[in-house]
Structures are given as structure tokens and as C-alpha cells.
Amino acid sequence: MELLRPDAADETRRLHSRHITLNSACEQLPEKDNRVRLSTKLDALGIPRPLLDYRVDDANGYVRKSFQQIVKFHAWVFARMGIPSADQFLLSDDPALNYGGSGHIMGTTIMGNKGDSVVDKDCRAHDHPNLYILGSSVFPTGSTANPTSTIAALALRAAKHIGDELRKNRQA
């Protein structure tokens, strides 16, 4: 029993074999003005809503320049394949243009030294010793890949640190 009409395979090849996806990524550099603040707007319980100040591009434009090189590379690849590029508008020098990321908002509670960051290497808040922040918000840079493995590694390191602190306090 034939499930498809005789010309279906040829038709499928003709319609669906002209698809190509070309993906690239560039690392997001730290942006000192990225942060989470409290909004003046309140939620249903009267608690201030979070307000996210977040830009992908850095002050020196390195991310924008990297992204522009990626777009040029894609155009070069497609030109070699005989495909006209539709992405030329992405080469804009408009400073208001803000390129989007992968949906991973990172770096709003950066890890580092006291005075220039929120948490130390163990994800412990500098100003609140019983507060640990575990997530991609502590990343000093955004990387180019999904953050799950790094978040898990940071959580394990923080858990070990917390366990060591509890044992040390119990012995004291």
C-alpha cells in the first residue's frame, strides 16, 4: 500500500530542501549600568515591582561591532551560495538600536570584589552575609551559550561554602 502519491517525494524535496539556518553568537561584555531596581509601581500586594535596566551593548560598542562582523560573515556565506542577504538593516550605526539576546538576562548582581560587585566568588552578598544569590545574575559576562551548567556549578560551589561555614560555626 502506497501512503504518498507517486510525485510526493519529488515535491517534498523541491519545497523543503531549500532551507538553511546559520547561527552565530558573540559574548556579551559587562555593562556597569545593567541592574534591577524597584519600580514606583506596586503589584497587587502593594510590593514594588522590579524594574530592569538592561542593555546588550557596552559603552564602547564592542558587542555591536562583534554583531556587525557576524552579520557581514552571514552575508558573505549567503552570497557564496547565491542567496541575497536580507539582513543589511542590522548593520545600522543607530546608537538607540539594542540587539536582543537569547532571553538570558545576566549580570545584574555581578560577582567580584567588594566595592565593584554584589557577591563574592561563593555567591555570598558582600553586605548581607546570610544572603547567597545563585543564578546567572552573578555572571561578570554573558558568554555565548545557555547558562544552566555554569549556574549548577556555582550552586554546588556555594552549597559547599555554606556547608563549610556551618561546620566551622558548629565547632566554634
Image: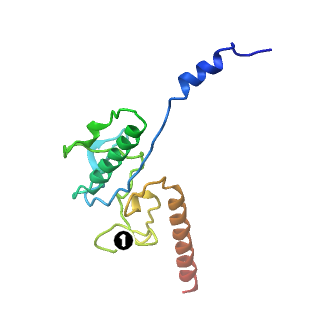
Badge count: 1
The amino acid type found where label 1 is placed reads: Gly
Task: State the image coordinates of residue 15 (x, y, percent, origin top left).
Answer: 54, 22
Q: As rendered, which of 86 and 39 lies closer to the eye? A: 86
Q: Residue furthest bottom?
A: 172
Q: As rendered, which of 153 and 71 lies closer to the eye? A: 71
Task: State the image coordinates of residue 79 (x, y, percent, origin top left).
Answer: 37, 38
Q: Residue at x 59, y 18 (%)?
A: 11
Quadrant that contains the C terminus: bottom right
Q: Residue furthest right?
A: 1
Q: Residue at x 22, y 42 (%)?
A: 92
Task: State the image coordinates of residue 118 (x, y, percent, origin top left).
Answer: 35, 66
Q: Is residue 86 above or below residue 129?
A: above
Q: How is the image coloured?
A: rainbow
Circle 1: element type:
loop
Task: State the image coordinates of residue 155 (x, y, percent, origin top left).
Answer: 53, 64
Tell whether 109 sits left or right of 9: left
Q: As rendered, which of 56 and 160 lies closer to the eye? A: 56
Q: Residue at x 48, y 55 (%)?
A: 147
Whether residue 75 is visible, yes or no, is yes
Q: Residue at x 50, y 61 (%)?
A: 150
> According to the image, label 1 marks what residue?
112
